[in-house]
Image: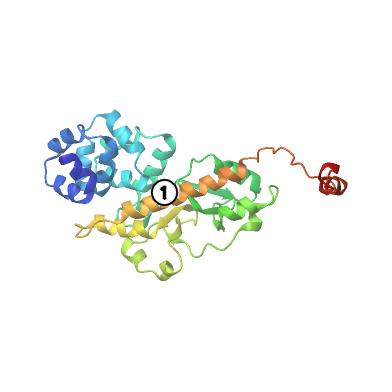
Amino acid sequence: MALKFLENEPVAAARQLELEDPDSVCAFFQKVSQRTLIPVLRTMLPAYAAPVITQLPEDFTGNLFSEMNQADIAAILRHTDSDNCERLLKLLPIRKQTACKLLVSFPEYTIGAWLETGLLVLDEHMEVQEALTRLKKKAYSETQDIYVVNRKRHVRGKISVYDLIRAAPTQPVNNLVRDSGPSLSGLTHVNTALSLPIWNQQDTVAVVNRKQEFLGVLHHFSVRTALSRMEEPTVPAQTSVSGDLMSAYTGAVLAIIDAAFRSPEPQEPQYRPTETQRKHDSTPSPRHR
């Protein structure tokens, strides 16, 4: 009964678990499959999730973290002490660890704490073939907008993955760049970010630091999630639905890339009769005259 409740009502389950003491929740978590726990853990307020996470066995926590995005992990780590934060960070692969450290360094009320950093970023001097080779590795969480930067990591613009697929392999990616719109500072308050008119034209915006260096992107649904976590939510957070839709989109794009890379199988030549053969075949045989 409890498992069905977790699977079917992760938001309500999270609210209920927040009322229990961390020791009990920790013991309960270890009796539930991690696949069932992920949606619940993503919905729990980080202040309540943190004391539970710090008590779980490290191998169990490591497996949970492997299925969670950097923003969700960083939100939890921000509510742990420095020793536990460092210990839990070491459970992550180096790349994810670095991204989480960046997010944790921003205050929770700023958009820098809610970035998506698992991106493919291209140098403006790359060629299309090199960009596609990197993209095919599937080590990136986002493929909808591929950002292009210069040597100083300043944003030059972005490229559509479909334009990359259609372009000549030796063409410079710089020729495909289109305007990415204004960038936001990572120190922008989430309340300020939500009220900006930029969301009328796009769902994602580039985020930079004080030196205008590209840090990552911010999704509109991430801003709403940030606000819901900064106060007691009265309605279900929108992270899971929007995040799942983004994952589905990414999977579809990667399938298209695979198809583009896959060379067509050789086909057997089809028999095509010549004009003389067609006339011969159409001439009735003596038996039918």
Residue 266 vs residue 214, the one in the foreground: 266
Q: Is residue 53 above or below residue 213?
A: above
Helix, strand or loop at disc 1?
A: helix
Residue 134 vs residue 107, the one in the foreground: 134
State the residue at coordinates (20%, 36%): 29
Residue 124 appears in view: no
State the residue at coordinates (60%, 41%): 133
**In which quadrant of the rendered view does residue 190 lie?**
bottom left
Residue 214 appears in view: yes
On the image, the x and y values in percent for residue 152 come to: 56, 52
Residue 62 vs residue 238, the one in the foreground: 238
Q: Is residue 140 above or below residue 26?
A: below
**Count of numbered circles on the image:** 1
Q: What residue type is labelled 1?
A: Ser
State the residue at coordinates (55%, 41%): 136
On the image, the x and y values in percent for residue 128 come to: 64, 48
**In which quadrant of the rendered view does residue 237 lie?**
bottom left
Task: Tell whether 135 sits left or right of 34.
Answer: right
On the image, the x and y values in percent for residue 59 come to: 30, 28
Quadrant occupied by the N terminus: top left
Task: Tell whether 229 sits left or right of 276.
Answer: left
Task: Tell whether 175 sits left or right of 222.
Answer: right
Q: Is residue 68 above or below residue 202?
A: above
Provide the residue designation for mark 1. Answer: 247
